[in-house]
Image (spheres, rainbow, N blue to C red):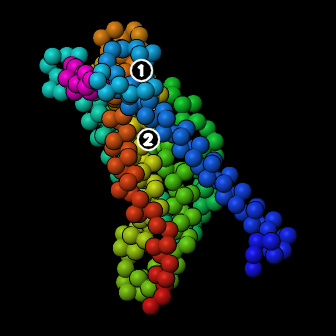
């Protein structure tokens, strides 16, 4: 059948699909450009000599490229007694906070979600409502109280204790997220394990936890990224220049009052290096985000 012999409705439907496909691909191409162009400009800026953003060309000139900004990040020490540069030290602090935060958030959130999804007890529903209400208030509303708590416990200028705040702010949302996933895991798996003499902890660690890996991968990635991207909390609980996280360190590079560190092009280089651990974790966690892991687990 030739094109001229097609029914008018068939031709209209085919034309509509073609136009729709063109629109979707054009939109995806535009969105891709909106992401890639700023990233490419940031890369160019990190290799441009000097301190002025106005000196960054939209067209790369490889003859003027320099590594001076990256060299600065790995060599500059505000105090000569430091074993590493300011950027490396702050990077390692943020990395330690991120790793600890990921571990604690995943364990606390998963165990709490297991209780809410598998057990019925008095006050269960009111507790779920309270957890939901807690998400309505931004975390910085309690900044004064948080500062007083850290001061009274002697936790100021100690970034590792930020984990207590990060966990408290992340667990309520994660409980709802993981609980919804666990409710899709057949209860018959728990019952079969208990018939064989398994305790609640055994059921959790040997059955529920492994089957929840897909959603836990998502939770772990979010928990890992939180300390890297947080500026508000460290800026209030840390004295600048003493125990900075990486967010504080790179912010000082954009502050004109920080005469020794101010250089927006150093900030561009630091921002690119900051993305490395986040990108690595996201790539490694891709294989865990598979929601079909539990399908067919009840058969046998």
Q: Residue tagged by mark 2?
A: 226
Can I make out residue 128 in this image? Answer: yes
Q: Is residue 206 above or below residue 135?
A: below
Which quarter of the figure has residue 16?
bottom right
Element type at marker 1?
loop
Can I make out residue 148 in this image? Answer: no
Q: Nearer the viewer, residue 49 or 128?
A: 49
| Magenta highlight range | 65-77
Image spot of residue 262 (x, y percent): 36, 14
Quarter in which the N terminus is drawn: bottom right
Residue 265 in the magenta stretch? The answer is no
* Left or right of 142 on screen, residue 81: left
Mark 2 → mark 1, Cα distance in angstroms: 31 Å
Element type at marker 2?
helix
Q: Is residue 123 above or below residue 292?
A: above
Image spot of residue 284 (x, y percent): 35, 56
- Give me the residue at 29% from left, 41% from top: 96
Q: Nearer the viewer, residue 244 or 115?
A: 244
Q: Residue tagged by mark 1?
A: 56
- Give me the residue at 38% from left, 46% from top: 279
Q: Nearer the viewer, residue 175 or 227?
A: 227
Residue 69 in the magenta stretch? The answer is yes
Label 2 crowd bin: few (<14), some (14–19), many (20+), radius 10 Å? some
């Amino acid at each position: 059948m030739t094109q001229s012999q097609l029914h008018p409705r068939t031709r209209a439907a085919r034309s509509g699909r073609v136009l729709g496909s063109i629109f979707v691909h054009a939109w995806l191409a535009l969105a891709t450009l909106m992401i890639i162009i700023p990233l490419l400009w940031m890369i160019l800026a990190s290799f441009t000599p000097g301190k002025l953003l106005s000196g960054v060309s939209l067209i790369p000139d490889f003859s003027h490229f320099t590594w001076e900004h990256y060299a600065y990040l790995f060599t500059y020490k505000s105090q000569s007694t430091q074993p590493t540069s300011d950027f490396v030290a702050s990077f390692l602090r943020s990395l330690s906070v991120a790793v600890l935060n990921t571990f604690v958030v995943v364990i606390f959130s998963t165990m709490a979600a297991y209780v809410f999804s598998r057990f019925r007890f008095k006050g269960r529903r009111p507790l779920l409502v309270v957890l939901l209400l807690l998400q309505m208030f931004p975390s910085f509303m309690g900044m004064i109280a948080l500062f007083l708590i850290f001061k009274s416990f002697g936790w100021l200028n100690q970034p590792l204790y930020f984990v207590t705040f990060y966990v408290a702010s992340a667990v309520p949302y994660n409980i709802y997220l993981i609980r919804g996933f666990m409710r899709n895991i057949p209860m018959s798996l728990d019952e079969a394990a208990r018939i064989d003499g398994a305790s609640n902890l055994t059921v959790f660690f040997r059955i529920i936890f492994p089957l929840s890996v897909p959603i836990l991968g998502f939770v772990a990635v979010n928990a890992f990224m939180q300390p890297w991207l947080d500026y508000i909390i460290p800026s209030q609980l840390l004295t600048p220049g003493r125990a900075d996280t990486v967010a504080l360190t790179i912010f000082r590079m954009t502050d004109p009052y920080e005469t020794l560190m101010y250089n927006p092009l150093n900030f561009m280089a630091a921002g690119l290096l900051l993305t490395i651990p986040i990108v690595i974790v996201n790539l490694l966690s891709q294989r865990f985000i598979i929601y079909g892991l539990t399908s067919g687990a009840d058969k046998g």
